[in-house]
């Protein structure tokens, strides 16, 4: 199968998994992957929606919160919305990220 076909076949499966396991940690990770596939397809508004929903679901300062925020900032950046990208990144700025950037503290 071509990459585009693989992406198209994966999206409904992820959506079904998210629905079947709604609220679970696994569904949150599946939502992150779904957003990544949408981003890869350049379906930026759909990716933005998935990531925004995910960020609202997860606790701040968790790895998934930070990763989702970075990914959402990339979505905004690729649409030329630099102000929103910066706002999202500032919202995700936590002690753990600073440690990572500074080489572990």
Image: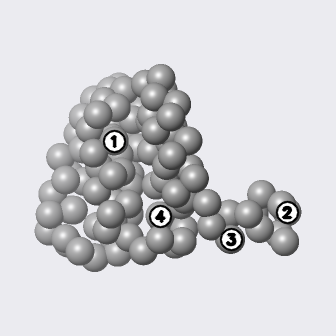
Query: Which mark is in front, 3 or 1?
Result: 3
Q: Would you name the residue on which mark 3 appears?
A: 95
How far apart are labels 2 and 3 at the CA level?
A: 12 Å
Q: CA distance from mark 2 to mark 4?
A: 20 Å
Left or right side of 99 for 69: left
Residue 6 drawn at (x, y percent): 31, 35
Q: Is residue 68 above or below residue 4?
A: below
Residue at 61% across, 60% down: 93
- Between the residue at mark 4 and the residue at mark 1, the CA separation in whole angstroms equals 14 Å
Which sits earlier in the primary sequence, circle 2 or circle 1? 1
Q: Position of residue 38 (x, y in %)?
A: 33, 37
Q: Which residue is depicted at the point 62% across and 67% down?
A: 94
Looking at the rendered structure, the secondary structure element under dot 2 is loop
Q: Secondary structure at mark 1?
A: helix
Q: Nearer the viewer, residue 41 or 63?
A: 63
Quarter of the figure with the C terminus: bottom right
Q: Which residue: 28% across, 76% down? A: 24
Residue 48, disc: 1
In the drawing, what numbered circle is on residue 103? Answer: 2
Label 3 close to label 4 by CB (< 8 Å): no
């Amino acid at each position: 199968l071509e990459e585009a076909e693989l992406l198209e076949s994966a999206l409904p499966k992820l959506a079904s998994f998210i629905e079947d396991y709604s609220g679970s940690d696994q569904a949150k990770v599946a939502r992150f992957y779904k957003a990544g596939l949408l981003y890869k397809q350049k379906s930026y508004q759909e990716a933005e929606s998935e990531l925004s929903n995910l960020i609202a679901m997860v606790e701040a300062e968790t790895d998934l919160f930070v990763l989702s925020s970075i990914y959402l900032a990339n979505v905004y950046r690729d649409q030329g919305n630099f102000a929103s990208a910066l706002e999202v990144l500032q919202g995700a700025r936590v002690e753990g990220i600073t440690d990572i950037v500074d080489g572990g503290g």
